Amino acid sequence: MKRRDFVQYAGLGAGALMMPSLLLGNDIPTEALLEPGMDTLVKKRMADVALNTAKSLGATYADTRIGRYLNQYVFTREDKVQNVVNTESFGIGIRVIANGTWGFASTNSVTEDGIKKATEQAVAIAKANSKIQKEPVKLAPVNAYGEVFWKTPIKKDFKEVPVSEKVDLLLSANAAALDNGANFVNSALFMVNEQKYFASTDGSYIDQDIHRLWPTLRVTAVDKAAGTFKTRENMSAPVGMGYEYLDGLESEKLEGPAGLRLYRNSYDMVEDATMAAKQAKEKLTAKSVDAGKYDLVLEPNHLGLTIHESVGHPLELDRVLGYEANYAGTSFASLDKLKSGNFKYGSDIVNLVADKTQVGSLGAVGYDDEGVKAKKWDLVRNGVLTNFQAIRDQAHMIGEEESHGCCYAQSWDDVQFQRMPNVSLEPGKEKYSISEMIKDVEKGIYIAGRGSYSIDQQRYNFQFGGTVFYEIKNGEIVGMLEDVAYQSNTQEFWNSCVKICDKDDYRLFGTFFDGKGQPSQVSAVSHGSSTARFNDVNVINTGRNI
Amino acid sequence: MAIYTKEEARKILEKALSFSKADTCEINLSGYNSGNIRYARNTVSTSGYSSNQSLAVQSSFGKKSGTATIDEFDDASLEKVVRRAEELAQLSPENPEFMEPLGPQMYDEAITYSESTANVTPEYRAEVASSSIVPADAKDVTAAGFLNDSAGFSAMINSKGLFAYNQTTDVDFTVTMRTNDGTGSGWVKRDFNDVDKFDADEAAKTAIDKAVLSREAKAIEPGKYTVILEPAASADLLRNMFRSLNARSADEGRSFMSAPDGKNKIGEKIVDERVNIYSDPLNPEVPTATWNSEGQAIKKTSWIENGVVKNLAYDRFWAKEKGVEPVPFPSNAIMTGGDASLEELIKSTKKGILVTRLWYIRSVDPQTLLYTGLTRDGTFYIENGEIKYPVKNFRFNESPIIMLNNLETLGQQVRINGNLIPYMKVRDFTFTSLSDAV
């Protein structure tokens, strides 16, 4: 498939997301998805070729990843299947330290000869660059795990579900949207299987089978006479689950305010498409918001993106240290603020945790891409900044003895580096429901689903939109709003958090395409929370007359 | 990996096509070599080298198509990939929007390839990094930068007799300079097809000067200001406007380019009459390939002329539906500029803001093309024709349409991201809040 078409089909326009090159492997027939790939014994032998070659050339450390990336995408619009794509990408990446400097090279020729050549190149790059190296690499120790295996706990492997079943689901959702007044509907399924074999000179041989799935929906209602249009996106999340996420289990549905249906660990796409059509039409005539201060009640599938941008990114140690200064930026959350031990990131009820082990999340793995076992740790406890996200070559810079295990590369031919783990807001400890929360708000706005998002390069000032907005007056939802965006400052915003619903409301938001690094790489990550209330936030009106 | 010549590519493609038994067959062959160096904290961080080549076959029976790809080009592999595409085509649902491949086309000779760029070495990349790091060190500044160079080719053939070939090279450089007290930041971007046009020392100096000049910025009230936008700033907003030049979305009523009653805005004046935007693959400053992935010839095309929408892009299916000629999507954007230099634009400004670049631009309302984002890496207050002092960064909420309606002056053009965009002075640009970010 052509790159441009992919962007169009995927509805990834408007620069919202980085274009992931890993999603464009070689096209293969559907049945080839089920082929087993290279035998583990052979992988181990090939990995040893890389490690031994690196050592013989003077590398003090080496790791290698043999990756097989199997992807399937199904794209539809209205009553048409636009494309069904199966891709496979297979190859090996070798990373070395020589003269205290990193070097990396990759090849799709997974043969002894191909691997030796790539390893030589990686060592040569490290040695060439060591001439301008001022900070020799220092790795935190890691356990040698021997030969181990980890797999995403899935119930249904997408590769075993017939394409016709996937097409039927999407076309049924599209039909439901059109029957309920939509003018256009685009829907798609993105399904990813990363088969990764990691080995390092530290003595680990780690085989992993990682699964992710993302259903998308974009429903558009047009007022032709007026020449206006509105869209409503899906209320689902991308997940680290199998095809069972699309079972639409009643037990995983939540009743939201204003008749909204919200989804936990199971998604009913047809039902959501029906709601989407009705809401897209309603948006055409919704009241334009009066700018001003409001108490915001933010639904998890909305708040997740705010957590991602205002907590996940600023607490990435590579940003804090300046490694991302030329692209993604640096961070307001400096080392000094961490060391002070009293930097008030949020109010006392704000507890934010990093977790690479959370079941169903996009970031869940057994081990990261430098062989460190996945773990969970605090970032903000009782409102106070307590830690960053660090990998092996950074841990010593914050006085840690070991890596946090959040190193990742999007493919075998990209070098691994520090990526955001799942970062989530812990639910409130006391029993408190969304309806109780709304009842307590005098003048507010309830926002559900993701929308426009923008934040500065040090993560102070941000602006977020949403999918649907409802006005709250004196404890009741009084109607839909449009043209809503809120602007705040990270520290001010998290300190205005006054209430968080309990664990019954907890859900995961996710993004498939978090972008960072040069050349840019994408990474998938989830963010959990319960609905939370933030007081006195500045809301602007984004309506314009042209 | 070899960058195949036209004849080498043709030989592989003709061989592959000879295996086809489908009603129609279209084959694309492409490859690249690409190297990069990345540095931060005044030292090298990561760098790498990658090369790739692939051949993609699209076979069609009636309106059913299948695509298969391979990276080995011996006869057996070529036959295998063609058979696989044909099997997939037989299994696929009919695509009601299928268009048969084009017949032979006439293409202009592209000017996108430079031997110098193709010959860039790891040592050259390390020198470029040094050209940033050494002067930065001397000025109490920290450099973080990235250089990427690539050389590649693409070729296609189809069963209707079409053949196309192109070679291209690119070099892309950015560096961010931050003062070590953390209060100043400067940035530059340079991109060329020919690396000989790139002056790493000049680029580093510009960014360092900006970093030093932007130290200890003052806060001024957000609001509507006259702004001088450097091309790097306006290009990002204009790129977003360019994405709406799609006739189908416009005709379907879901784009800024939609007009009431199912019409589009072709012929409508949407911006200041001094605005002229066109694309031209043969412009020597910003050359592109002269054909696209469907084999359509890319020619000089006007998009906005004297402020009026002149053309929207029609893909072949939509053009047939609407009974018009297809118009390929622009391969670059060239906005006509004026004579004024940046210094002259500043001199003629009574009160305004100079913006180096914009950051994290996201769509807020596709109906009005309203975007939000922030200024970054050098924002300055101008009074009575002079830069007075650096100011804190702003968040903006603005539409490129409103921006181009509020045009005051067009300055000289600069290449940015493969486009030619002029400096622009614009009144009433909407800043909605302040940011503490440096």
Image (cartoon, helix red, strand yellow):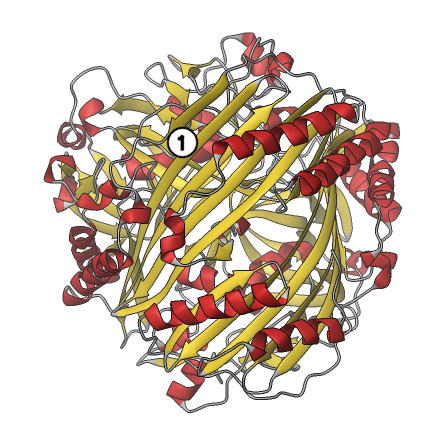
Residue A505's spot in the image, x, y percent? Answer: 20, 29
Q: Residue at 50% of width from left, 82% of height from top?
A: B101
Q: Amino acid at mark 1?
A: Ile
Residue B398 location in percent, x, y? 50, 56
Does A207 appear above or below B336? above
Nearer to the camera, B146 or A488: B146
Secondary structure of the residue carrying tag 1 is helix
Residue B127 visible in rendering: yes
Counting other residues with Cα less than 10 Å from the Cα at mark 1, is it few (<14), some (14-19), or many (20 or more)?
A: many
Quarter the C terminus of chain B occupies = top right
Residue at screen point 30% across, 42% down: A157
Q: Quadrant of residue B408?
A: bottom right
Question: In the drawing, does residue A34 fall left or right of residue A135?
Answer: left
Horizontal side of residue A250 vs A454, given as left or right? left
Residue under numbered circle 1: A307
Q: Nearer the viewer, residue B244 or B147?
A: B147
Position of the N terminus of chain B by quadrant: bottom right
Q: Chain of mark 1?
A: A
Quarter residue B175 falls in: top right
Q: Nearer the viewer, residue B319 or A343?
A: B319
Q: Is residue B315 above or below residue A58?
A: below
Instruction: State the image coordinates of residue A343 (x, y, percent, origin top left).
Output: 50, 14
Residue B380 pos. (x, y %): 70, 44
The quadrant where residue B405 appears: bottom right
Judge whether residue A11 can be spotted in this image: no
Number of numbered discs overlaid on the protein picture: 1
Q: Nearer the viewer, residue A99 or B189?
A: A99
Q: Is residue A189 left or right of residue A327?
A: left
